[in-house]
Image: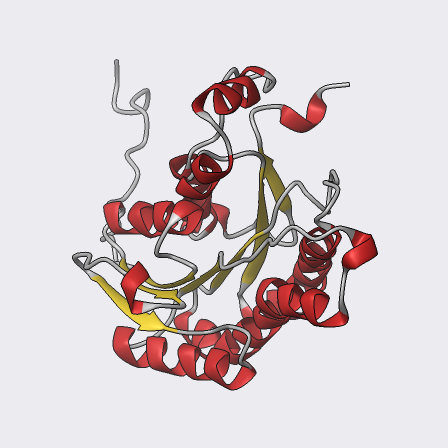
Amino acid sequence: MTAHDAAPTAPTVPSVPRRVLVTGGSRGIGAGIVGGFLRAGDRVVYTATSPRQAAPLPNASYLPCDLRDDAAASELVRAATGLLGGLDVIVHCAGVYPERPLTRMTTEAWDDVLAVNLRSAMTLVRESVPALTASGRGRVVLVSSITGPVTGIAGLTHYAASKAGLEGFMRAAALELAPLGITVNAIAPGTVMTDGLAALFTPAEIAALGQRIPAGRLGTPEDIAALAVFLAGEGASFITGQSVVVDGGQTRVE
């Protein structure tokens, strides 16, 4: 084989740790996403509503934040940017899903869910635009759900509306921020095995849930984290305005 036949060798590019803010990063899918970025060698600031929910993690800092408070959400971005010395990635994973039938829905209950799941996303992304633009590799990843954008669950009209709204926001924000070099995408998980799910169902019921999914199992936080880390990377620089369903085929069953 001559030199002309040899495959070209890609240049070695030094890996620069990303500076990442993850909301709702103390448990469940959010904790999995924090772990995914830490394993990739990145530096992470993550949030929870209570210090009791936060466990010490190497290369990660914790900031308390109640995302119902618009001023607190704005301050969170400033504080995280200061701790990290800039901001490359924001992952909005915080969410609430209290069950309430539509016939007993109150304006207060509706507004509370939309404040955390949807309105805070607007505040966080808006406030992070200067830092993400300065980064030169700005990434926004919004954790949505199949519930709302694809399917529905009785008793979760407020949650479904918030997640459908989140994806509409994502598509419009992607168009506005693309000229600034910022990508905006969403991940729509199916049923994922978390402590929260374990508290709601018996082991037998959880096993049955997994058997109904074509992949034969429930998702894991690590499944979602793998996509979040990819969407935050250079390999996803031409992907924006997209929602990616991660559900093992759950929504493809007739």
| Residue 207 image offset from top left, x and y in percent | 48, 19
Between residues 208 and 48, which one lies in front from this camera angle?
208
Nearer to me, 185 or 196: 196
Task: Answer left or right for 174 relative to 209.
Answer: right
The structure residue drawn at horizontal position 41% and vertical position 46%, both measured from the top left corner, is 28
Residue lying at the far right in this picture: please name it.
103
Closer to the camera in the image, 60 or 130: 60
User: Does 67 appear above or below 244?
Assistant: below
- Looking at the image, which is closer to me, 5 or 48? 48
Image position of 245 (left or right of 220): right
Instruction: Examine the image and state in which quarter residue 77 appears.
Output: bottom left
Looking at the image, residue 102 sits to the left or right of residue 7; the answer is right
Residue 114, percent across and down? 66, 66
Q: Which part of the image, by quadrant, shows the N terminus?
A: top left
Coloring scheme used: secondary structure
Which x, y percent locates residue 182?
53, 65
**Relative horizontal placement of residue 222, taking residue 3 as reference (left or right):** right
Task: Determine the image quadrant of residue 221.
Answer: top left
Residue at position x 60%, y 62% from top?
117
Q: Residue furthest front?
A: 104
Q: Quadrant of the C terminus?
A: top right
> Image point 67% across, 54% down: which residue?
159
Where 122 falls versus 57 (above or below)?
below
The total number of labels drawn is 0
